[in-house]
Amino acid sequence: MGNEIVKDSETVAKKRKKIGLTSAIFIALGLGIVCGVVFYYCVPAGFVRDDVFVDGIFYVVGQGFIRLMQMLVVPLVFCSIVCGAAAIGDTKTLGKVGVKTLVFYLCTTAIAVAVALGVASLISPGLGVDMSAIVTGDTSSLDSGGTETDGSITTMLLNIIPTNPLGALAGGDMLAVIFFALFVGIIVAIMGRKAETVHSFFEQFNDIMMKMTTAVMYVAPFGVFCLLARTFSGVGFEAFLPMLKYIASVLLGLAVHCLVVYMLLLAIFARVNPITFLKKFVSVMVFAFSTSSSNATIPLNVETITTKIGVDRSIASFTIPLGATINMDGTAIMQGVAVVFTAQLFGVPLGPAEYATVILTATLASIGTAGVPSVGLITLSMVFNSVGLPLEGIALIMGIDRILDMTRTAVNITGDAVCTTVVARQEGRLDLKTYNDPDAGKEAEQMDASV
Ligand code: ASP
């Protein structure tokens, strides 16, 4: 009798286990979009739609989920970089990984802008557009996310060194946090046994943060559903019509970069099957798409790239947060297309010199773009200024930017993961057995697995 009950509960548990987290997030994504569209077109505006659902339940659950993930970012980044640097140990290897990562990040961003300029020149998104039909966005809604985008390069460089590390941690100043954590990690490695207690403290704290990430992911399907339902209940398809060519250019640029450039880089420089990477990574892309925030995606990205892809934690813990802060290929693509769009709309001629300037400034703008929603539009002004384009162009694309922000964020974080995989492979720190195992890391993500 007792045995039968145990058996029955095991079968039920097995059945329930079948819904993996990735599938649940995908279903939530689709349902959220459908629900949002139905709300926009079929439910009359009023207290129930707007106050109870859109700005009530959807907003609270969606933002609550993002805040839960953001809550983990600073402690996770700090601890995992300390542990990563301490594990690598020698500063020479650390320097080599750092330089390779930086070069890779900068080059892929420059390629991304070039792809965008090419695609936009082919499609000509700004020709034949009826300006009066475009829904102009409200520039006051833009929040720089705490990034100093208006400072000079020297100030930006100096700000990497925090005068008060606790202030940097409290303010979520990522580059300063990364710098301080790297320094602590290197010293911990140099001190060896003398700093053993501190080392194991950070290692245990890091494990706790990873467990918390897994725990927070249980509510991901609900968060994703509410985030998408809210977004789509606020935008109708009418707003997209006059901008279709612009949207198509950005999406095509993103697709080419993600599905051609990244896949080639994986095949050539990491010598692995890129399709395997995509299959394992798609849930992180959906997460970034739903939250529009590279920063909020850091914990899930680090976990996926280590447990499913097989990158050594000592590399991923350092390169993923760095990438989420300075490597924004998707944003650079939007900026490249926006330049061509606005130039065509306002009749400003662009020659080879202007194209080269855009590649340079958009790459720099990518470094200055914080990994939170909409900041790419703020740094776009720097790119526009460099080639003398009117800033009104930004107000024109703002009305439909939300959906593109979601898509480019998915590409931004994919770029970080691809680079991390390549660097890890070259340093002999990619476990090919994990990479090629379709079930690697899955046990952690079953909906009913215990935390
Ligand atoms: N939302 C983007 C990110 O977090 C930044 C942007 O392009 O606005 O990566």
Image (spheres, rainbow, N blue to C red):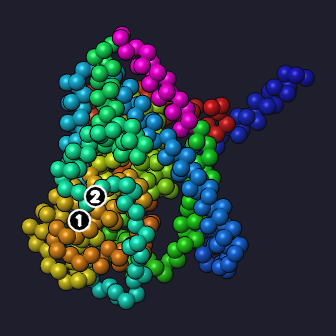
Q: Does label 1 or label 2 sit earlier along the sequence?
A: 2
The answer to whether residue 221 shows anywhere in this view is yes
The residue stretch that appears in magenta: 193-214
For the residue marked with disc 1, what is the amino acid? Met
Look at the magenta stretch and give its main secondary structure.
Answer: helix
**Of labels 1 and 2, the one closer to you:** 2
For disc 2, the marked residue is 149
Q: Which residue lies furthest to the right in this view?
A: 1
Quarter of the picture containing the N terminus is top right
| Quadrant in which residue 53 is drawn | bottom right
Q: In the rendered image, is residue 112 in sight?
A: no
306 left or right, relative to 26: left
Q: Does the residue labelled 1 lie within 8 Å of ligand 1?
A: no
Q: Residue at x 65, y 64 (%)?
A: 56
Q: Do the residues labelled 1 and 2 touch (CB within 8 Å)?
A: yes
Expressed as whole percent of the image width and height from the top left, the position of residue 192 reads 33, 13
Q: Please tell me in which quadrant of the rendered image residue 448 appears.
A: top right
Q: In this view, does 269 lie above or below 343?
A: above
Q: Does the magenta stretch include residue 236?
A: no
Q: Nearer the viewer, residue 278 or 197?
A: 197
User: Looking at the image, which residue sits at the far left?
Assistant: 353
Q: In which quarter of the image is the C terminus?
A: top right
Q: In this view, does 385 lie above or below 267?
A: below
The answer for how far apart the CA atoms under marks 1 and 2 are is 9 Å
Crowding around mark 1 (Cα neighbors within 10 Å: few <14, some 14 to 19, many 20+) is: some
User: What residue is at 50 percent from the left and 40 percent from the top?
Assistant: 72
Tell me the residue that label 1 is attached to: 382
